[in-house]
Image (cartoon, rainbow, N blue to C red):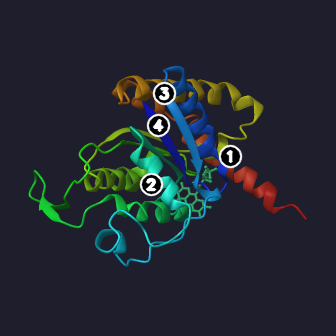
Amino acid sequence: MKITIFNGSPKAENSNTHFMVEQFTKGAQQAGAEVENVFLAKKDIKPCKGCFSCWLKTPGNCVIKDDMAELLEKIKGSDILVFATPLYVDNVTGIMKIFMDRIIPVGDPHIEKDENGESVHVNKHGKAPKLVVISNCGFPEQSHFQVLELLFKRIARNLRTEVVGEIYRGGGAILKEAPLILKPLTMKYSKLLQKAGREIAENSRLSKETRAELEKPLIPVDTYIAAANKYFDQLLSKD
Ligand SMILES: Cc1cc2nc3c(=O)[nH]c(=O)nc-3n(C[C@H](O)[C@H](O)[C@H](O)COP(=O)(O)O)c2cc1C
């Protein structure tokens, strides 16, 4: 089982996303998976030009010469792809979006209808890697991830695969640098992330039970809002 994790936070290893990825990785490795972690912020990935050369002139190969060729090979060699991103403006980060656009060389331009009668590109690869989503955001509720839930469902459809795990953490801004008083909570959450990694490695799927546990708030929403506002007031009152 080969799992490749693409982290789209501009903060790379200093990100809350990485806090989640590290624990997930630990669990997956314990269950025997080979896990590779790619910091997209450290890669040279230019935006797609929209020329469709990768479909029509040099099938499978993009005309842009940057790190994306190496990343496409990693995608093709994986059983599971993990898209790990903080929530930016209710969506993935710009870094992640540029990376996602550049995945189109793996596709085929021909169109057919899927089982629901909706157009989709022909699957030329057979078995595509399954998808896992890991995300955290600044607002405390889980409702902020509704755009990502729909987005990755649609991406999986386009890639002719499925989402086998979604790990969303509202109020995730406290993960990386949790005050001492919150450490027991983040440690408990870390164990759950490890469990999620183990489940993906063992069953290629996150169980409903573990997902439900992962969805529970770390701290009550009103406590989070009060603490965040106090913190912002302190920062803003500094000379
Ligand atoms: C440009 C920008 C946009 C953001 N948009 C949202 C948002 O729409 N909703 C939200 O809850 N948090 C938003 N945030 C907060 C981040 O999701 C939050 O700080 C997160 O913990 C960052 O994760 P990271 O440390 O993994 O990079 C935004 C942050 C930035 C910098």
The residue that mark 1 highlights is: 13
Label ID, residue 86: none
The residue that mark 4 highlights is: 3
Q: Is residue 124 above or below residue 194?
A: below
Label ID, residue 33: 3
In the rendered image, the quadrant that contains the N terminus is top left
Q: Quadrant of residue 190?
A: top right
Element under disc 3: loop
Upstream in the sequence, badge 3 or badge 2? Answer: 3
Upstream in the sequence, badge 2 or badge 1? Answer: 1
Q: Is residue 22 above or below residue 210?
A: below
Query: 197 or 62: which is nearer to us?
Result: 62
Hey, what amino acid is under mark 2? Answer: Leu
Q: Is residue 210 above or below residue 162?
A: above
Element under disc 2: helix
Name the side, left or right, on which 12 lies relative to 67: right
| Mark 4 and mark 3: Cα distance apart in space | 7 Å
User: Does residue 136 appear anywhere in the picture?
Assistant: no
